Image: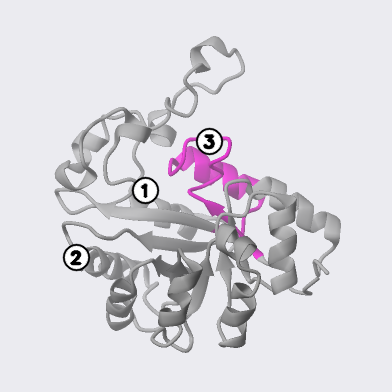
């Protein structure tokens, strides 16, 4: 196996056990020892970046509203927790709902959590496209990173997207912030490898790496580090170790950290 121990990045927080993108999920990931946090961001109608994956709120907040058409104050009234634990009222050991932990999470609040934490934590931020706001998402993100002093090369933040155009835009807005070109289909790498920046990271999905055994080597041979999503099993982790993957994005950070600890500090 490869000798590099990958960074363990919590996918939408510790989202296997907790409602995704809630502060509760992120604090659980930090408590577990996650070295990085991953989030998706969208713009609200009144211009706030919030950590929400889907364009609408049906799955995670029982609402037909679109994030892009809803003000932050109205999002704050919604319950982003109960969908994950629908039987919590019947479970004596279930944690009590907490508005601070279980409501919509702004990116600013997540950045503040990372900034205040007692060890370095990195943050992988995915901008979602297509969106009605187009490039405004990256502009607002760059502005926010600038306020934290995180718009430069030593930033704990990296920006990811499936949109090559969005990453080009981010490169202009915040030079030095690492960029991750997400790859959904193995066949798209043939085109992407000709255009992605020489120092860009590449982020294929674990399913594509599994189904196309040569893909990971092709990306590495082109000189790019690999950050892989979403790695949740021992077999998937082993494949990443064989490929020398630098970061694994997982719903189960505590489990992957335990597996890596069992393999020793070098994960070899």
- Within 10 Å of disc 3 (Cα), the crowding (few <14, some 14-19, many 20+) is many
In the rendered image, which quarter is residue 2 located in?
Answer: bottom right
Foreground residue among 230 and 150: 230
**Region rendered in magenta:** 7-36
266 sits to left or right of 130: right
Q: Residue at x 38, y 66 (%)?
A: 162
- Which circle's residue, 2 or 1, is located before the other in the chain? 1
- The number of numbered badges drawn on the structure is 3
Farthest residue toward the top? 90
Q: Residue at x 43, y 44 (%)?
A: 21
Give the residue pinned by disc 3.
18
Give the labeled residue for mark 1: 53
Q: Residue at x 17, y 41 (%)?
A: 70
Compute the Cα span from label 1 to label 3: 15 Å
**Quadrant in the picture for the C terminus:** bottom right
Tell me if I can see residue 156 in this picture. Answer: no
């Amino acid at each position: 196996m490869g000798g590099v121990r990958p960074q363990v990045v919590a996918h939408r927080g510790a989202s296997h056990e907790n409602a995704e993108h809630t502060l509760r999920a992120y604090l659980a990931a930090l408590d577990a020892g996650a070295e990085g946090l991953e989030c998706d961001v969208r713009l609200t109608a009144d211009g706030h970046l919030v950590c929400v994956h889907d364009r609408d709120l049906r799955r995670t907040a029982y609402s037909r509203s679109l994030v892009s058409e809803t003000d932050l104050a109205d999002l704050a009234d919604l319950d982003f927790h109960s969908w994950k634990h629908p039987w919590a009222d019947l479970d004596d050991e279930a944690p009590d709902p907490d508005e601070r932990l279980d409501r919509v999470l702004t990116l600013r609040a997540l950045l503040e959590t990372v900034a205040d934490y007692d060890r370095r934590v990195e943050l992988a931020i995915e901008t979602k496209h297509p969106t009605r706001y187009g490039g405004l998402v990256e502009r607002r993100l760059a502005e926010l990173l600038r306020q934290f002093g995180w718009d430069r090369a030593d930033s704990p933040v990296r920006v990811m997207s499936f949109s090559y155009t969005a990453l080009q835009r981010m490169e202009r807005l915040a030079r030095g912030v690492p960029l991750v070109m997400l790859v959904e289909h193995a066949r798209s790498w043939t085109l992407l490898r000709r255009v992605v920046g020489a120092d860009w990271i590449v982020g294929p999905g674990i399913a594509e790496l599994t189904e196309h055994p040569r893909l990971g080597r092709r990306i590495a041979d082109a000189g790019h580090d690999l950050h892989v999503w979403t790695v949740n099993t021992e077999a998937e982790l082993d494949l990443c170790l064989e490929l020398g993957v630098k970061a694994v994005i997982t719903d189960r950070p505590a489990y992957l950290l335990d597996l890596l600890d069992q393999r020793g500090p070098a994960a070899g």
